[in-house]
Amino acid sequence: MDQHMLEKIALNVIQGRLEADDEGFDEGLEGKPAVTELVKQAIRDGVDPKSIVLEALTGSMEVVGEKFERGEYLIPDMLASAECVGAAMDLLSPHLLRAGVETKGKFVIGTVQGDLHDIGKNIVSIMLKGAGYEVIDLGADVPTDQIVRAVKEHQAPYLGLSALLTTTMRVMKDVIDKLKEEGIRDNVKVLIGGAPTSKEFADQIGADAHCKDAFEATDLLKAMAH
Amino acid sequence: MDNEQPLNSKRTDSSTFGPYRQGVLVKPYERLNRHHIKWLNDASMSILNEPGIWCYNHRAANLFKAHGAEIHEEKEASGSFFWRVRLPEGLVRDAVSKAPSRFILGARKPENRLLLDAEVPRVYFGTGSEANVWIDVHMEEFVSVDDSQIKVKVPRFREIRGNTTLLCRAAKLCEQLEHLDFFIRPLNIQDSDITSNNHDANKFFASLNNTTKHVQAGLTSLERLNDVIKMAEIIAGGRKDLIKNPLISFIACVFKSPLQIVDETAEKVFAIVESGLPLVISSSPQGGSSAPIQEAGMVAQINAEILAGITLVQLIKERAPVLYGSVPVRARLDNLFDLYGCPEFNQYNIDCVQMARFYKIPCYSSAGVGDAKVPGMQAAFEKLFTHLHMAMSGAQYIHYAFGLLDRTNSFCPVQAVLDNEQIGKIKHCLREPKVDPSITADMIKMVKKVMASSHRLFARHARRAMHAGDVSSPYRFEAKESEDKALENALGYMTQLENESAPHLDQATVDRIFNEIPGLMPGLRQVVK
């Protein structure tokens, strides 16, 4: 019974169906229970939340990643699946907490002050949540002090900074300097991204890594964890 | 003629046409208003009456005369005779009104048939010309003399004279090009064994045995028409099946501009029309030499020529399927060669599409030709400039659209692959808008849903449109780095396409054709595996 439920959740993650009215990738699924409804049902039925994460969510995201690599899935498909996992994690987190299961870590993310662009940042946010991180998304145009405060408050091991404009990318350096000032620079890995940024720029401002897209961010975090 | 009133309705009854290629239905861009159309129609009718046409074919002149035209035998300075034919407007109007506005061009595969409807701007693209030269392209790597680490790949071109093997290869490649709707032999076959006596049989067989799309060509020798028709009958399954599914059709350039009916071609028109197969009455005057360069003069003259040709067709056989074949071009004024990728080309041609629509006859038009001799930026500009405009015009049947270079003198297969990508994008761009109350209601629902979500991102909701094919793909031959690799990537893609097997006819059909049709080259005897 549990296994059947886990398979259904996994299938719907791969299909990228968050709610019953989502169409999914294949035809004929619209109207059938999707990840949100199924995870709620699984919790009610007493399915082990840890097995939901390990057997239904993590494995299915790997399948989605493989489909993307093969060109079978495009970004919207990846995002749909990642959103499903993110929503499932929101529903499961209180249960996981009680069971003593930890996330992959807290990740504070935001677009720096003066910059209202948040599409790239949102994609990274959705993908990381889908990959099992606890994402604290501060939004766009976030003042430097607020970013540093959030890192401190959440004791986050990871910080993601985003900027689209050549005029705002230098604010990333202000954030890093502020982290140093506050004496917490060594406690947090700073990842930066955004169209005008580069590996060279990351080195120049003292960031730990530059991510060209959400996939690279996920890969880098995986490497950092080891 | 009252130009606010259409010619009498020529719609066939609510026939069911069966499957056919969808092409692209466009909202036509029109240059001419109804006054322009009236003035041009009046001018054409006036030209047909005075000076009239110079008809070098006695049978055609007599047929015109039998239906009320005034004819006079005249003698040229060279000593040859011709007939001055003055066509009364009523005769032309009546004849043109009998031409069907809607008919099918058949194909070996039913789903590859074309539905031509003068009142529906459904656009199809295909090949054309009968170029003498095939251009082979390959990339060659060059190393910098200063730094051996610096390497560049440069396209190298080789000209080969057209032959039957290359025509087979062209047809097989065109079968694979998804945006190519019909096949007109783009290459002249010049093998040593090819003569005017077996040219038709070999070019039609090379085409029909390598594509399941509609095949069209001019007729080299009137004496070989029956061979070609017999071949098509064998493939179609008999005479009746061929008429129902005319998988071949013909092009006749019966007019030599200005205003002269060619004797030999007129005879071909008689024979083709009597066979019951569809025919294009094509005229290709050159603005600045064989027609006025001015838009009004060019269109009035070419329209007169085509109307006279269609009149001849309908006098031979009422309701014979015929296309309004307009290929007006402009002269380069530095050497009087044809100039295709220029504004006047689009102006002349769009006007002709409108005139054909006015007479309710499907329009055979042109696009995708230029002066560029090799693939590259000039070719891309000249081709896009006409591909896009002529598709926007709503011409039903656009030939010349794939692979031509150096005006119509060369056919380059990789250029056809590049053109296919370009035409695909144009077809996508000109699709009908998908807007109705149900769709807008769905969109409102989507906006509400996204605005209530954490990241207000629509990407996930692009999926349905993406998977339904409503969202176009990026340019197929784009480079990932800061370089232009369109040609190199297109060559790679062409290799993939050419590795697909050819849609040859079955053994029994090929055997029967080789037994019954004389003059076929043994090398063409290939069958489906």
Image (spheres, grey):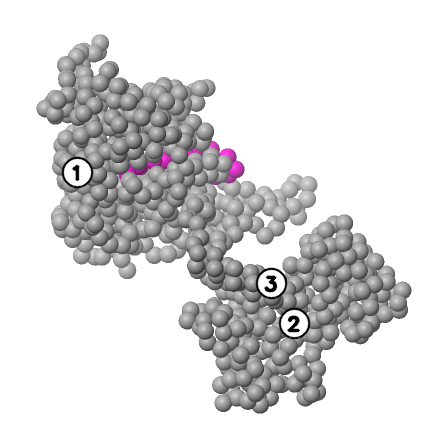
In what element is the residue under mark 3? helix
Query: Is residue B369 highlighted in magenta?
Result: yes
Quadrant containing the C terminus of chain B is bottom left
Mark 2 or mark 3, whichever is nearer to me: 3
Answer above or below: position of B137 versus B237.
above
Question: Which residue type does callout 3 highlight?
Answer: Met
Q: Nearer the viewer, residue B29 or A179?
A: B29
Q: Nearer the viewer, residue B443 or B149?
A: B443
B215 horizontally vs B144: left or right: left
Give the residue pinned by disc 3. Answer: B451
User: Does the residue at mark 1 contact the one at mark 3 (Cβ under 8 Å)?
Assistant: no
Mark 1 or mark 3, whichever is nearer to me: 3
Q: Estimate how packed mark 1 is, as few (under 14), some (14 to 19) or many (20 or more) residues with alpha carbons within 10 Å.
A: some
Give the residue pinned by disc 1. Answer: B319
Identify the residue at horizontal 18%, vertical 25% (top origin).
B90
Q: Is residue B115 visible?
A: yes
Question: Which residue type does callout 2 highlight?
Answer: Lys
For the stretch drawn in magenta, what is the main secondary structure? loop
Q: Nearer the viewer, residue B6 or B58?
A: B6
Marks 2 and 3 sit apart, C-alpha to C-alpha, by 19 Å
Q: Estimate how packed mark 2 is, as few (under 14), some (14 to 19) or many (20 or more) residues with alpha carbons within 10 Å.
A: many
Give the residue pinned by disc 2. Answer: A129
Which mark is on residue B407? none
Magenta residues span B362-379
Quadrant containing the N terminus of chain B is top left
Answer above or below: position of A37 versus B244.
below
Query: Is residue B350 highlighted in magenta?
Result: no
Question: Which residue type does callout 1 highlight?
Answer: Arg
